[in-house]
Image (tube, rainbow, N blue to C red):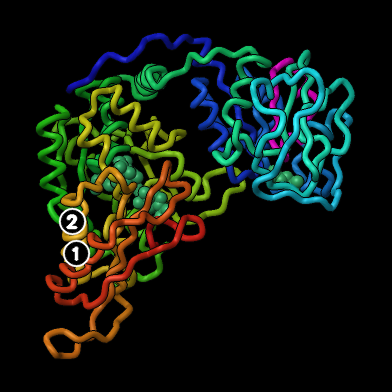
Amino acid sequence: MAVTQSDSSATSELEDRPVLVVDYGAQYAQLIARRVRDANIYSEIVPHTMPTEQILAKNPAAIVLSGGPSSVYAEGAPAGDRRLYESGVPVFGICYGFQVMAQTLGGNVAHTGLREYGATDATLTGNGVSFLAGTPVAQNVWMSHGDSVTEAPSGFEVLASTEGAPVAAFVNEEKKLGGVQWHPEVKHSDFGQQILENFLFNVAGLKPTWTTGNVIDEQVEKIREQVGDAKVICALSGGVDSSVAAALVHKAVGDQLTCFFIDHGLLRDGEREQVEQDYAETMGIKVVTIDESDRFVSALEGLTDPEDKRKAIGREFIRSFEDAQRKLVAELGGNGEDIKFLVQGTLYPDVVESGGGEGAANIKSHHNVGGLPEDLAFDLVEPLRTLFKDEVRAIGRKLGVPEKIVARQPFPGPGLGIRVIGEVTRENLSVLRAADAIARAELTKAGLDNEVWQMPVVLLSQVRSVGVQGDGRTYGHPIVLRPVSSEDAMTADWSRLPYDLLAKISNRITNEVQEVNRVVLDVTSKPPGTIEWE
Ligand SMILES: Nc1ncnc2c1ncn2[C@@H]1O[C@H](COP(=O)(O)OP(=O)(O)OP(=O)(O)O)[C@@H](O)[C@H]1O
Ligand SMILES: O=c1[nH]c(=O)c2[nH+]cn([C@@H]3O[C@H](COP(=O)(O)O)[C@@H](O)[C@H]3O)c2[nH]1
Ligand SMILES: NC(=O)CC[C@H](N)C(=O)O
Ligand SMILES: [Mg+2]
């Protein structure tokens, strides 16, 4: 396959020494890890329930403590551990993390009655600006707190204050400990990235040596270690994540890999042919297509609850891979035990939304994480599990995965199954498929494919409305257009597509798809909506 050599500058020191983000149940833990990686330093998240000795055993280069919903003085709140701060590892606290550091080291945290949410003016104080170096004396920061540090621990210098937080940032340079009350990880904090980098580079003394090339080298090594010379199968959808996962595994173990693309009958118009063609043309990886549409459509019969549908789809995916595994084993003349590794292109958002983050709620069971059956017999190989889509795209480009695949808009594994609201039947699928094909064709024609993150087209099969067509009454179904813009699918906004384009799509769908007499536009951001409707 067309693979370029990645940097081989990964050293075992880097590989062994991540910056650990301790997650206190934050909304933004994954964003913090992401910002650290943006600073070219490898980062991973660990739960706050992990014992200190286990955290330190991971040999972290530095630790960042996240925010969290608790109050440090409340009963049962996640507690700090002095040993963490006395270990010599640099620690940076954010919001709850800042408060817990203050409390543990003898400072004071109180409910002052002065809450701050959203944009807040901060003023730098003190002589040495430390990790606030290079940022203006008055700056806009993003806050989200009800408690405040009222007294810094002794030996700490206060670096900034706001109206509601007299101690809004502090540092002990010598001990390499510091923190802020605000959220430097969100884009709305004006100098957030710079502040994090100042701490990591200047206070903690780290070097920005991690790149996507390092991920490639590290993952290739890990994959080799995990699978040895065993055969491996990959769940390949033709999407960005599984293509990049397949390219990584292929780089690691070459022809030990066979990819299976499941046609579950929930694909879009022309998708199967497109995937087969793209792979044959560009990737040079063996891909076997399996037609399983009967299996999936019958498993979905009678189901209308989104979670039931997702779980059924997750289960049938695995059953399909088990069949594929048996066939491959028979072909190779071995026994079933020989192939136990299944590669999936799972990303971090799939994991958090499935409730896999520390204390994170289950929003929806992604088929490849929360939708997996309990009796899963495969050992999963998921080299992208801690990453976000744009990071995965960068890795894909570095591996030489063609732009056509890397730049593709995401399409969920459960496919049209979660875009038919109500029961999934062959009839409903064919209505949705026709409407979706029109919407996609017009978006492409308007040259806007790269402007939108993705545009789900949704059929409300349980809703009917009255219309008039050809002077006659119709009683048809609505189609919803859900174009969104996003950076990482964690948050999203609805895309302001040109009215002419929307009019064209609406007109064509109602003219060409008989069962549809109404097209509506979803103008909800995420949150509160999610991107998909189920
Ligand atoms: N039709 C399919 N056949 C085989 N595996 C699939 C199929 N659809 C999804 N998968 C597996 O489920 C994983 C998660 O799907 P998901 O849609 O998140 O990723 P993707 O399709 O690889 O990328 P993208 O987000 O760009 O669509 C995939 O990476 C792949 O391993
Ligand atoms: O492979 C997948 N399996 C799933 O079960 C699944 N559910 C949602 N998605 C995709 O994930 C991103 C976030 O979607 P939501 O805002 O709807 O949660 C969007 O890009 C969705 O298309 C899925 N992908
Ligand atoms: N975002 C946070 O970490 C909040 C910390 C704490 N719950 C407070 O309200 O002050
Ligand atoms: Mg997909």
> How far apart are the two marked residues, 1 and 2, measured between alpha carbons?
8 Å
Label 2, on which residue? Answer: 442
Residue identified by numbered label 1: 504
Q: Quarter containing ligand 1?
A: top left
* Residue 58 visible within the image: yes
Q: Which residues are magenta?
A: 81-98
Dot 1 beta carbon under 8 Å from ligand 2: no
Relative image position of residue 76 (x, y in whole percent):
79, 47
Residue found 17% across the figure and 23% down from its top: 1
Q: Residue 167 versus residue 68: which sits nearer the camera?
A: 167
Name the image quarter holding the C terminus: bottom left
Q: Is mark 2 within 8 Å of ligand 2?
A: no
Whether the magenta-drawn stretch holds residue 105 is answered as: no
Q: Residue at x 23, y 81 (%)?
A: 476
Helix, strand or loop at mark 1: helix
Q: Could you tell me which secondary element the residue under label 2 belongs to?
A: helix
Residue 105: x %, y % from top left: 85, 28
Q: Position of residue 297 (x, y in %)?
A: 23, 63
Q: Are marks 1 and 2 in contact (CB under 8 Å)?
A: yes
Query: To which quarter of the image does residue 475 belong?
Result: bottom left
Instruction: Residue at 46%, 57% (x, y): give it.
Output: 525
